[in-house]
Each structure stands twice: as C-alpha cells, then as structure tokens.
Image (tube, rainbow, N blue to C red):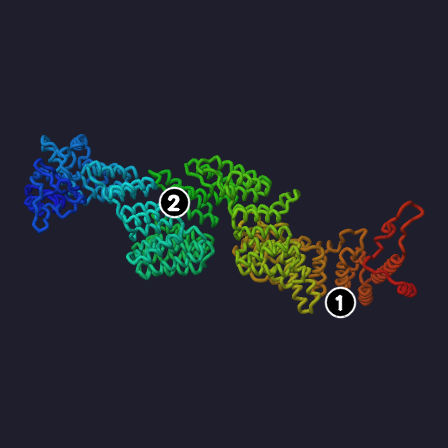
Amino acid sequence: RVPVSAARGASRRPWTVAVAPGPRRSGDSRSSDRAHRGASRARDVVVGAVADPRGTGVEDDANVETPAKAAPANGRGRGARGRGARNRGGSRVPSPLRNFASLSPEDVRAAAAIVDAFDAALRRGDLEGCVAAIGADDESSSARDKDDDEGRWVGATRGGDDDRRRPKAKKSGNRRNRRALMREVGCRLNPAHKQFLGACKDARRLDLALRYAQSLPPNPRLYSSVLGACAQAKDHAAAVAAFDLYSRHGLAPDAFAYSGLISAAGKCGDLRSAEAALRRAVTEGACDQAVMNAYVDACARMGLYDEAKGTVDAMRDAGQCAANVRTYNSLITAAARAGDLRAAQDVLAEVDANEDITPTDRTYGAALSAAANDGGTRSAENVRWALEVYRRASEAGMGANNHAVSSLLTTLARGVAAGSWSGDDAVERAGSILATLVEGGGVPGSKVPNAAVWSAFMSVCARAGRAKEALGALRLMRTRGYPLEPYTLASALTACRGAPREEEEALEVFESAPPEASATTAVRNAAIALYAARGRADRAFALYEEMRAEGANAESFLESNAPDTITYNTLIAACVASNKSARASALLKDMIAAGVPRSERTYVSLMASASRTAPEGEGAAAAARVFAEAEADDTTGPANEFIYTALIDAQSKGGDPNAAFETYGKMKAAGVSPTVVTFGCLLNACRHFASSGAGESDVDPAELAYALLSEMSERGVVPNDRCQNALVRVVSEAGRIDDMLDEVKAIARRRGKFERTTLEGVVRALCRASYAERALRILSWMDVRGYSPSAPTYRALVQVCATEGQVQWAWTLHQRMRRLGYRPDRPTCSALTQALCRAAVATDSGEARGMLRRAVEAFERAAATGVAAEGEGEANAWDEDDERTSPTGMTVEQEIASMEDQSNWDASGDWSLENDAPVALGPACPLKGEVAAAAEAKAKRGKVPPEEVLSPGAIRSLIAAAARTGELKFALKLYRSPGGRAALKPARVRGESGNAEDGGARRELLEVMCEACCHEGLIDVALEVFDDIKAYDIRVSKVTLAFLEACCRRSKVPEWRVFDVCAQLRHQVTATKQARLAAQMPAKSRSHHVYGVVDSTDSSDEDDVDSSIPPASSSSSSSSSSSS
C-alpha cells in the first residue's frame, strides 16, 4: 500500500523526469520541497535504451536526436542516470536528450489522486477498482491501442534512427501530457506492484494483472513480476500474454523474462513449452544461469532427472553457462521426485568434490528428501546415509531446517515400516532431534519446528507403535506454546490407532482442540477412524452429519469441510467390520448423491461387506456383483490389480475358491499383472478347497500352493512373509508335517516374520499328529513374539498334553486359557480330568490329593461357566488376528461373574471337596461388572450337569480317584448324579461283556466305591453299590465281594443281604468256570444238519464269554474241578 503523503510530489529517484513545482500547501512541506528540488534538475534519458527496470518511462521530444551509440540494453549503463555519461577522460558528456515537458501542478495533483484511488481500492480488496483507478479502460487507453504501431513509448525501442518509430510532429500535446502523467503514476505505484500482483494471484485474476501492466509505462521489472505471479498461479496462458508485453512495447526479453516463462511452463507441467522457451533464449543470447536453473527446476518438478542432468552437462560442455549451487539443488530435487536415491547421492558427491560450491540448507534438505522418497528397498543403508547427511548439516549450522528434519523423520518412519530399522531407535532419534529444535533452535510461536516436523514425528511414533510418545509431543506443544496445526493433530490421531487407552486420550484432545485445528476434513477423518475403532459408531456418524451440514452451507467447495472420499471409505470400512452392510450401502448412495468420487478402496470394502453378510454359499456371487458395479463406475477407472485382488480375497473368504481362481484367470486375460498380495490371497484360497467340497475334484491344496509359488518365481514376484505364512498354513492343514516343518525352518533361517495364525496352524497340526513336545516348542515361539493362541489352539494343546502324559503342561495351559476367558470344550475337560485322575493314582497320597483337587477344580469351573460348543472360538476368514469375541454368548462381566459363582447346579449341596472351603479358582480375573450383574448372571444360569461337562469315562475316573483319595462325599455326590448313573451304563447293554466295553473302568469304579464305603463303615451305601453291580452284571473281584460279606456280617444288616452277597459271589465263580470250559472246547466248523460252513460266532454265547479272561490250561482246569 502506498501512503498518500509519500506519493505526493515528484519522486526523488535520480532517473525520473523533472516535475514542475506545484503550489505549496500546509502539512506537505517535505513533498513540496522535494518537488521544488526535482524541478531544478534536468534529467536526461538516452533514446533507444530499454525502459528503466525500476519503473520509469521516458518521454520523447521532436528535437531529440538519436545518439550514434545507444546505452546498454539493460538500462543500467553509467550514462543512463540522467546527468550524462562520462568520457574516457572523466569529464561528463552532455546528454542528447533535452527539452522534456514538465508536469503542471494540476497533473501532479491528478497523479496523486489516481494513486489515492488505487490505494483505497486495494485496501478494500477491489482489484477491478484498482485497474479502473489508473484509467486502464479510458479513452486514452483505447487511443493508445489504436495507434500502437506509431504510439510506442519513446525509449522502449532498441536504438536506431528509424523515423517510423518516432512520433509525428503533428501529434497534439495532450497525448504527451497523458504519458507524462502515467509515468509519474508508475513511479508512485512502484512499491505497490508486489502487493497488487499477489492479490491478483490469490484471486486468480491474472487478467487484471495484465491490464495493470499494460496501463503503465514499459517496465521490464514489472513484466517479470507479472510472469512470476503467473508462474505461482500455474497459469501458462497468462504467462505467455505477459511475455508478449516485451515485444509489444519493443523491448527485448531478457534472462528474467525467459526464466519467468520457463518457470510458469514448468509449474504447469508443460515441459515442451519450457524447452521451446529455453531454445529461444539460447538463440537470442539471453540464456544465463537463471534461465538454465529455471529449466532444470521444471524438469525437477516432473521428476525428469535424466533430462535435467543432460541439459546441465550439455550447457557446461558448450561453455554457455556453468552450474551453481541452485542447479545442483534442482538436480537433487529431480532425483528425489524420481525416487532415485543413487542419483541424488552422486550429485551430492559432485557438490562435495567442487571446491567452488558450498552446500546450502536446501542442498541438505533435497538430499534428505531423496532418502525419504526412495522407491527402492528402503534398506538400513539408506537410513544411515540420511543420518550422515543430517549430521553434516548440523555441523554446518543448518540442522534447524524444517524441510531437512521432516525429511529425515520421514525416512526413519518408512524404514520402520519396511522392517529395516528398529522402531525404538527411530523414536529415540526422532525425539532427540525434536528436543534439540525445541530447546535450541525453536522458540514459542516460531516456525521451527513447524507443523511438518511435528507431523513427521507423529508418523515415526505411528510406525513404531508408540502412541504414548505421540501424545507426549502434543503435551509438549501445548506447554511450549506451539500452535496446534490441523495436519499435526491428524497425524497424532492416526498414531494412536491400536492403543485403546491412548485412543481415548487422543479423542479427548480432539474434542478440546480449537475449531481452527479440529474442523478440517483431514482431522475429522482421523477422529472418525478412532471413534469407529473404539466402537463409538454413534459419535462417528454424528461427526459425519456435522460435516455434511457444513458442506451444504458453505459458499464454495474450497471453504467447506464436507465429507470426502476418505470420510466415506472410513465409515464404510467401519460398517463392514461391524457387519452393517445396509448402512454401508446407504453411505454409498449418499456418496453418489453428493458427487464425491468413489475409489477402488470404496468398492473393496463393499465387496468384503457383501461377501461377509451374504447367506452361506452366496458370498462369492455377492462380491462379483459389487465388482461389476465398480467396473461400471466412471470415477474409478478400469479395474486394476488392487480391485481384482480384493475380489479374489472376497471370493476365497466367501467359501468359493474355484471362483477365486476363475477371477485370477480373467485378471491375467485382461493383461493385469498379479502382485505378491494377489498370490497371497490365492494361497489362502487353497485352504478352503477341502471345506468347500472341492476335495472331491482331486485337487491337492498343498500341490496347488506349490504350483502358485512356481508361477511367482516365473513372473519375478518375490514371496513375502505373508505368502510364506499362507503356504505353511496350507501345508499344515493338509497334514504334511515334514513339509510344514521344512517351511517353518526356512522362514526362521531367513529371519522372516511369523504370523499368529501361521504358528497356530503349526501347533494344531502337531497336536493332531500327537507331537506334544514339538507343539510346546512352537508355543514358546508364540510367547516370545507376544502372540496369544486362540481358544481352539489352547484346547488342542491341553488335549494332546493330557493324552501324551504331559499332565503339568496340560494343567498350566488350562489355567492360562481360563485367565484369558476361554472356555474348554467337553473333550478338553474330559482329557484333562482323566489325566489328572491317573496322576492321582500313580503318586503318593499328598500329591494324589493335589491332583484330585485340580481335577475337581477343572470340573467345577466348567460346570459353573459351561463348556464350549464344537467349533466355538474358531476365527472365520474375516476375523482379524487380534479379534476376540465372547464364546459364551454372555457379556464379559456376566461370564466372569458366573465363573466365580459357586452355587450348586442341582441345589443339593456344595460340589467342593469341603463344605466350608470352596475350590480355589486360580488367579482372580479382573471383575469389571457390578454386583448386580453378578447376581443377575447367577440367577439366570445354574451349573451345567456333569454329563454335559465330562464324558462317561472322565466321570468314572473322577469318581474312582475321589473315592480312592478319601473324598468319599464328593464321589458319592457325583456317583448318584444323573451323569454318574449314565456313566455306569455300557454303550450296548446286550451282546457285550460288562468289562469288555471300557477295559474294566466300570469294574474298577464299583470295586473302589464298594471298598471305600466298607472302610468308612457305610455298609448301606456299599450295598447300594452292590445293587448296581448286580443290575449291570459287572464282574468285580472276589476279594471285593468277600470283604463286603465280612463287613455285612459284622454290621447289623438283614441276613438276606449277606446271603445275596454270597449268591453273587457263587454266580461269578460259576460264570467264570463256564467261560473257561467254553474256551477250551473246539468250535465246530461244519454240521451234518445244514449245508455249508457254520460261523463259530453263531454257536457261542456272547453274554457268557469274558474275552478279557485268557483260556486256562488243562492242569488248572482239573484243579478247579477237584476243588469244586
């Protein structure tokens, strides 16, 4: 803005024309004095010289003669300062220009009025008013345009005595006065050029900037400024129009003009026009370092490193211009944008080798940007090189550079993401650099560190999984007074994903942040993602509705915070995760109605939703329909490898692997190259062949997986860890243990990353093969990596350890799964109980009682919480690795409350070993619910009957172990329960011996119960057991019956009970004798009554044969006969 007091009167610049003094007014003495002093000096300007670059024009005169030698074209010759040039002897040479017309006082006042009007319009932001104030559209302008061929500004042509370019003598003095007036206006508006052109650039009104430049006297500096504004606005057409102003006013374009034109073309991405301008500059002899640097910068903007490097080498070899530090900076930038770190390293090495060039902060910043944008392997060597470059910058005093620091932190973040750099080390280094900037280089309210640095630090924390450090950085910003920028807040919210506690704190920061930081679309998108992750869908959709309302009320799209593609994609993904396909479809309709373009990710989520929520067997077809919609959508473009891979994955998880492989065939037929992710999805599809019924078509999943690996090798696709893990899962589910272990060893040798599901598949495959020790070894690998097995894996481990005699491991794993809230199923409880009961028999009395208490505890907790159903806890194809659902159908609070409930399932007494001492339930789980929740769970759910918890064999083992260790009360309670009664029944009552069905388990149970009751003096209870012996015709030991007879004779029982025991004893002896005699008799193979062969099993009495008794010898038979 030009102050009015400074704009009045003639300018003090020595190259302006003389102005006649105006009337002296009070309050403006200094201006009048300057005008008076300016009037006393006659200033001459050489005819034919280029108009002065500092904004003055020159006036022609009829009596002016053209000098023999013109002044330099740049207007900066020593003789162009208005007082005549000096000759070789040092004396002044009179200027050939004289008799200039001077401004009248009225013209001076008119010039001041024009400038005041321009200043007032500029302050109002009225750009058109600014142009109108200087008379760009008045009659004089039209007259000037009409007589353009002979009305050029004198001094705007390049030398010569061409009379055609001189004004005719018959022209009136009005035109001369008008030009003198505009020359004075141009002088006064010099300080306002930058502000006005910047306002035109911001308002995208470069047409006004062009009219403004045309209205003022020829000024190369003004034209170059207009070219710069056009370049910043990326308007190449306006830049060409500004460049034409030079030729229109007879000015030869200089290096500034060509550099501005090339820069505008480069920023518009028009390299062909930039190259044409460069060739023209070289032809006209106006090419210097600035022009070459402008072209190199244009190449750098498009990442054309080879083109930029070739241009620099060609000009250096031709001797036209040498490269300077700005040239090398642009070359490094070109290499960075091309993702060629090696080229950037070579250019930096060339800079180091040149002693005449000193690297600047931009040099180091561009080099670090090349490290951050490296499109290669992102190895640790790249990170080390970036750290070394930053060390050099710090030693040179250029470490406090926002661009350099943000690029270094980005390099660290991407190194962590690629797995080539330690996350802890990256966070530590990033925190140290940030602290150095805050403590030394930065002050509150300063631009170091800026929002880009803070956001890059948040990215490092996000990649390393360090949400606490990200929140700590936010607290540091608030403490030190740094402004919270939207980009920084969005990065912090993203860094807190996956950490529940930090997610809540981050959302609190978002809700308390000022509107200028939290009201942007990017920040709200990050907040919506956190709300969805925390299960607060209502708050996420409320924020979405706020964004829609603000977008509807906004005057323009740029000012609105309406939902964008990322917003809709985030919400659709949240709906897919929560199985709300209807809501996802409604969001798609809103997206189309709002005119928001869809992306591949939009339809990827919709395909997953369709496949996941479709009825069984229809998921693949539903995903294919969504894929067809994506192909018909104009905003997504043709199907690429990303959307093809998503369809293959959806069809595989939808249970149709054949459809997945058909899609893969169509993908190859369409010319779309599969990626490593595509092959990973196909390997996962191999696992579904057996379950989908494809096994009937002689498809071997393992062989198909190995064929896919061969195809990957042929296509040059390197398998990543996910592919290797998928191969291990396929082979393990196919039961190929040796191949599975070979693949596991291969991943371990190359230090690959094992996935949780892969190790779980290996463990379960080893469990199915009864390799308990190997399964436990793989379990230790999972513990080291922080993986927690799922409930089915725990159940398989408990079963195999219990079966293979690893009782202590079985019990430990059972406790671990209980602490995690997993329920064992019936086979797991049965196997563990039987193993503990066997251990109770094999150890001494003290350890036996401990083992029994463990068995009872396992039974108690299973009876209290219920057992898992078949397949409960199995993760389906859509579940994530860290997803954990409640397997009981109850809430977590109710489930824990029911676990701690010690009430009786039949309300007939306590199931514990001692009435006043309940069985210890191990480490207490954290009770999250209230007492009311526990009471409600207790009222709704009683204990599960024993027959639903344990198998008949496990019930028999538990009863026998309890009776043998002295816990007769518990044994009798379980014995009299419906489950205990059912355990005494064989699978087939007739046609099978009582001892042959279970290997003598029922006989052992009845013998132990009968003897234990006799030892305790409970003869009536012993006779109750004896009645079961007769009812089920189970042959117990003669010692047991003899001991029962003796106890009955000593006690006061009816005599007929004694006779009953004796009769049973005689019955068993007789039955045993008959079985032995039958075993000694040869079986008839033929009969004379019937034709053919008679099967020996037809003539034997299955009910009287005890297959467990071996045939006796003849001596033993005779001795038995004589004794009877």
Nearer-the-camera pick, 1068 or 337: 337
Residue 622's spot in the image, x, y percent?
55, 38
Q: CA distance from mark 2 to mark 1?
A: 82 Å
Q: Using a 10 Å C-alpha cutoff, classify the residue at mark 2 as few (fewer than 14 neighbours), some (14 to 19) or many (20 or more).
A: many
The residue carrying mark 2 is 521
Which residue is located at x 9 percent, y 41 percent?
A: 97
Label 2 element class:
helix
Residue 114 as seen in the image, left or right of residue 789: left
Q: Is residue 1028 left or right of residue 327?
A: right
Kind of residue at badge 2 = Thr
* Res. 809 visible in picture: yes
Q: Position of residue 626 (x, y in %)?
A: 51, 38
Q: What label sits on residue 1070 in the rendered view?
A: none
For residue 107, which quarter of the picture?
Answer: top left
Quadrant of image for the N terminus: top left
Vertical relation: 958 (above or below) 114? below
- Which residue in the protein does label 1 denote? 1015
Circle 1 — which element?
helix
Q: What's the residue at 80%, 64% (across, down)?
A: 1040
Q: Residues within 10 Å of mark 1 (few under 14, many from 20)?
A: some
Does 661 sit left or right of 306 as displayed? right
